[in-house]
């Protein structure tokens, strides 16, 4: 049996969270917390368990400067305590075999016993005749991990800002992603809010009654 | 200042979580917990705050039976305590104006003062010349909310199963989504694990060192 977290504690954290515009560059997230945030992403679910992603923790300040140059000069890219680049796999056809190898090892089974699972994974990919749609679906998988990392950070009292505003091709080049069958999906700045006027704005959300329909 | 949840409690919940294959149809999630799970989705971040989604809580058993018929007869669709259908907006061009109206109201500003934000929202959408890519990006936004709902449920000790295996067109028809400028993105079954042999399998994940790269 597991410990249960209280509803009110979760909602308090999610209401406290906002997309930080300006981080305090002097405040550093602990190794334990950054590891927990990334581990949360590793534990995220994905379609048929294919985990079509990689999380790149960019520590090198020169690299972060280069990323900022192709990211509309957003200070978050260099000033947040940590920068996580979430990359998505571009070689979807390799994912089913990798999955089967993992599951066979974990469950101590022969790969032949996992033909049903393999068929599901291959079928999920074969569904997409359109490469753009396939990439959109893989991108969506990485956003599950993104959401979970953001929530975990908020629960720990750590701030984040998810970022889509950058030159995707140039980020791939700077990080050498193409040769690893990867492409940038989204970035996540992680740290602590600085002197940020946005911190005090009331949260804007659609009303519950607008967003939720009971049928 | 907010309460902080312990790293170990978060990871315990995420390790306890798995995609439930068989729910106990007699165990019902409390109104408070289901509301917290959906509220977590409502509080999820989205690109420029456009919230391009709607969460449909399907309670009607006839509707759930119809969805199961177009969902490979998966028992989860009818047997889980609750079924949440996450729909994505198909009318992206309406999102910026809706955003500006919301922000103006929340921050008590004239819409004219928000032209910068409006430009960002319009620009994010105009980025996509390809309708398929646009829909993939909106789908990805909804998967942030999906990930956050799944984590919140796990923290509360509530089981889930995200589901992509169904006939998307027929689900849109059954729920009448098209006329609301919506299309199904993903489903989330919410409840409590039943007599499920999958519950005891060790979790399969890529190793931390495979999934995480430090640069």
Image (cartoon, coloured by chain):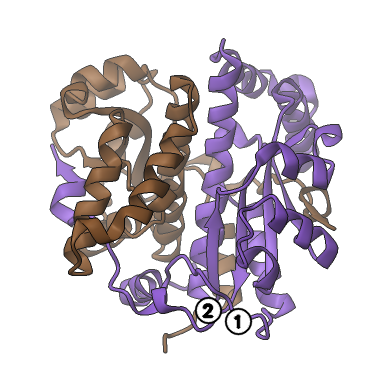
Chain colours: A purple, B brown
As helix, strand or loop, the secondary structure at mark 1 comes to loop
Relative depth, front residue between A79 and B62: A79
Pointer 1: what residue? A24
Q: What chain does mark 2 sit on? A: A
> Do the CB atoms of the residues marked 1 and 2 lie less than 8 Å apart?
yes
As helix, strand or loop, the secondary structure at mark 2 comes to loop
Question: x, y (%) of residue A63?
Answer: 82, 58
The relative height of residue A63 versus residue B23 in the rendered view (above or below) is below
Residue B57 falls in which quadrant of the image? top left
Q: What chain does mark 1 sit on? A: A
Q: Residues within 10 Å of mark 2 (few under 14, many from 20)?
A: many
Q: Residue at x 27, y 23 (%)?
A: B67
Task: Work out whether residue A40 can be spotted.
Answer: yes
Q: Residue at x 16, y 31 (%)?
A: B61
The relative height of residue B9 versus residue A133 in the rendered view (above or below) is below
Q: Residue furthest bottom?
A: B1
Residue A35 falls in which quadrant of the image? bottom right
Q: Residue at x 68, y 85 (%)?
A: A26
Task: Work out whether residue B28 can be spotted.
Answer: no
Question: x, y (%) of residue B19?
Answer: 50, 43
In the image: residue B72, left or right of residue A86:
left
In the image: residue B175, left or right of residue B16:
left
Q: Residue at x 65, y 75 (%)?
A: A33
The relative height of residue A105 versus residue B117 in the rendered view (above or below) is above
Q: Residue furthest top?
A: A129
Pointer 2: what residue? A193
């Amino acid at each position: 049996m597991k410990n249960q977290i209280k509803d009110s504690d979760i909602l308090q954290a999610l209401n406290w969270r906002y997309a930080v515009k300006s981080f305090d560059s002097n405040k550093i997230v602990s190794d334990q917390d950054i590891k927990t945030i990334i581990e949360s992403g590793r534990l995220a679910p994905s379609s048929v368990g294919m985990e079509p992603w990689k999380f790149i923790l960019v520590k090198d300040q020169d690299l972060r400067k280069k990323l900022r140059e192709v990211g509309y000069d957003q200070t978050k890219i260099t000033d947040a305590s940590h920068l996580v680049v979430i990359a998505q796999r571009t070689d979807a056809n390799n994912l089913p075999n990798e999955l089967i190898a993992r599951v066979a090892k974990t469950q101590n089974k022969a790969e032949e016993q996992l033909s049903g699972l393999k068929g599901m994974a291959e079928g999920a990919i074969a569904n997409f005749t359109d490469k753009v749609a396939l990439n959109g679906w893989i991108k969506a998988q990485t956003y599950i991990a993104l959401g979970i990392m953001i929530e975990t950070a908020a629960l720990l009292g750590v701030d984040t800002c998810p970022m889509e505003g950058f030159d995707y091709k140039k980020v791939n080049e700077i990080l050498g992603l193409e040769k690893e069958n990867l492409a940038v999906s989204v970035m996540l700045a992680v740290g602590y809010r600085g002197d940020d006027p946005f911190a005090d704005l009331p949260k804007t959300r659609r009303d519950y009654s607008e967003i939720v329909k009971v049928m």
